[in-house]
Image (cartoon, grey):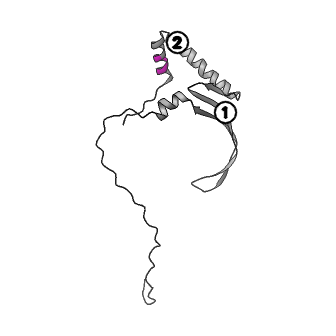
Amino acid sequence: MRENLTITKKELVNRIAESTGQTKVVVKEVLQQFLDDIIDELARGNRLEFREFGVFEVRERAARWAQNPRTLEKVRVPAKRVVKFKVGRMMRERVCDEEPPEEPMQAQPESPKREVAQQTPPPKPPPSNTNSPF
């Protein structure tokens, strides 16, 4: 299986500069302004729609009760605003729906299948002997 790479803004700037013939400085300024404007519009509560790519919007998440898994204590989670992204058609077709490119299969040991154990009550202890020291 192919290891996923992390692509940085610097790498994107380099790619765009190379493919457009613009300087890295200009591309970086344009890209940074684009990202800043997205953040500013979302902060104002606006929805951003990029046809074929996707839609960014801010939604209110209601306050709720949650449970600390370690202590099982109930805690109040306050309401908050979250950014949602809905994938557009082109991205969905290329990223989500399309089968990943086939890579040579490497021999991997087959993992044993786990069977679900039947729930049976534990066996009853033998009757205690009142004369036993145990």
Question: What amino acid type should be assigned to the residue bearing mark 2?
Answer: Val
Tell me which residue sits at (46%, 17%) in the image.
15
Position of residue 123 measured from the top left corner of the image (x, y, whole percent): 44, 76
**Magenta part of the chain:** 11-15
Tell me which residue sits at (63%, 24%) in the image.
38
| Left or right, residue 23 beside residue 32 | left
Residue situated in front as seen by the camera: 20 or 95: 95
Tell me which residue sits at (50%, 10%) in the image.
23
Q: Quadrant of the C terminus?
A: bottom left
Looking at the image, is mark 1 or mark 2 earlier in the sequence?
2
Q: Quadrant of the N terminus?
A: top left
Residue situated in front as seen by the camera: 101 or 84: 101
Question: Residue 75 colored magenta?
Answer: no
Label 2: element kind: helix
| Left or right, residue 14 beside residue 32 | left
69 is higher (above) or lower (below) than 42: below
Q: Residue furthest bottom?
A: 131
Asked whether the residues under the numbered discs 1 and 2 touch, taking CB atoms below 8 Å apart as contact, a structural biologist would say no
Question: What amino acid type should be assigned to the residue bearing mark 1?
Answer: Val
User: Mark 1 — residue?
Assistant: 58
Name the main secondary structure of what is drawn in magenta. Answer: helix
46 is higher (above) or lower (below) than 81: above
Q: CA distance from mark 1 to mark 2?
A: 31 Å
Label 1: element kind: strand
Position of residue 109 measured from the top left corner of the image (x, y, whole percent): 30, 48
Position of residue 21 measured from the top left corner of the image (x, y, whole percent): 47, 9
Other residues around mark 2 within 10 Å, as few (<14) / some (14–19) / many (≥20): few
Tell me which residue sits at (60%, 19%) in the image.
34
User: Mark 2 — residue?
Assistant: 25
Other residues around mark 1 within 10 Å, as few (<14) / some (14–19) / many (≥20): some
Residue situated in front as seen by the camera: 131 or 54: 54
